[in-house]
Image (cartoon, grey):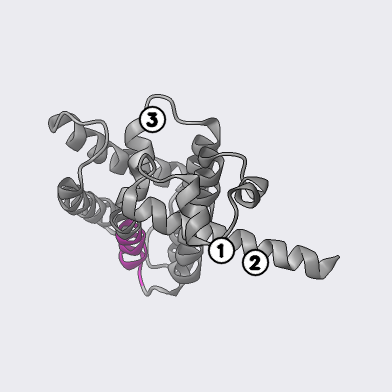
């Protein structure tokens, strides 16, 4: 039984990887379950056994990407010598994640006003995890005496994250789009780093 479950897990991972590559290169709208099954030399019926429809498959891929992104943060955030490097790493990693998976997110562009609840749940989980990791980074620096005491690190980080999100919202409203175009991402990233620099100076002054 254990061996059978292991084989199912391996097959599921292969489906997620093949689907990610399809979504990444062609976007959600131009990817079909038939094509994914063909990439895997798998019957369409077997693919549907694992995932009942394309949207459920997309959500599963997104959850895997989110998990991998958070693992990257968890593995590195505590290794930096100062708070600025830790927070800059988070902003840079998030930027690279969006750039590297840009076509994958065409699902957001197509359905931004009607995203499935499961998508919002993943977004919320990522936000909460980032909040916890960055708050812990502040607490660590306070304990080391590197920065002055911060009464509510979670609230401080939450305000920062709202402000960083506001930069994205401001950028797309000026460009009259609902989702940032790829050529706008570098501008958004630069502004986020500028805001982060101001934020860190406020904590370390």
Looking at the rendering, in which quadrant would you find the C terminus? bottom left
Q: Residues within 10 Å of mark 2 (few under 14, many from 20)?
A: few
- Left or right of residue 178, residue 145 in this image: right
Q: Is residue 187 above or below residue 42?
A: above
Q: Residue at point 60% right, 54% down?
A: 43
- Spatial CA distance of label 1 from label 2 is 6 Å
> In the rendered image, which residue does mark 3 sit on?
111
Q: Is disc 1 in contact with disc 2, using a CB cutoff of under 8 Å? A: yes
Q: Is disc 2 in contact with disc 3, using a CB cutoff of under 8 Å? A: no
Instruction: Look at the numbered disc 1 and give the secondary structure of its residue.
Output: helix
Disc marking residue 10: 2
**For this rendering, which residue is in front, 183 or 172?**
183
User: Is residue 58 visible to us here?
Assistant: yes
> In the rendered image, which residue does mark 1 sit on?
14
Q: Residues within 10 Å of mark 1 (few under 14, many from 20)?
A: few
**Magenta stretch, overall SS:** helix
Q: Residue furthest top?
A: 113
- Left or right of residue 43, residue 126 in this image: left
Bounds of the magenta segment: 82-93
Instruction: Look at the numbered disc 3 and give the secondary structure of its residue.
Output: helix
Q: Is residue 40 magenta?
A: no
**For this rendering, which residue is in front, 99 or 201?**
99
Q: Is residue 89 magenta?
A: yes
């Amino acid at each position: 039984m254990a061996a059978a479950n292991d084989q199912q897990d391996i097959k599921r991972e292969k489906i997620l990887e093949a689907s990610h590559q399809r979504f990444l290169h062609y976007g959600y709208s131009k990817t079909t379950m038939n094509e994914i099954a063909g990439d895997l030399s798998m019957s369409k019926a077997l693919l549907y056994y694992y995932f009942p429809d394309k949207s459920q498959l997309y959500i599963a891929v997104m959850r895997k990407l989110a998990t991998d992104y958070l693992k990257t943060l968890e593995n590195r955030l505590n290794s930096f010598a100062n708070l600025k490097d830790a927070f800059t790493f988070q902003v840079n990693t998030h930027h690279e994640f969006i750039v590297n998976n840009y076509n994958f997110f065409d699902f957001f562009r197509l359905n931004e006003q009607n995203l499935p609840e499961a998508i919002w749940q993943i977004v919320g989980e990522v936000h909460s995890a980032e909040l916890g990791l960055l708050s812990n980074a502040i607490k660590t620096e306070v304990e080391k005496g590197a920065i002055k005491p911060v009464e509510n690190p979670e609230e401080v980080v939450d305000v920062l994250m709202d402000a960083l999100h506001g930069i994205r919202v401001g950028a797309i409203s000026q460009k009259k789009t609902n989702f940032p175009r790829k050529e706008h991402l570098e501008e958004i990233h630069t502004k986020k780093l500028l805001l982060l620099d101001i934020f860190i100076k406020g904590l370390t002054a």
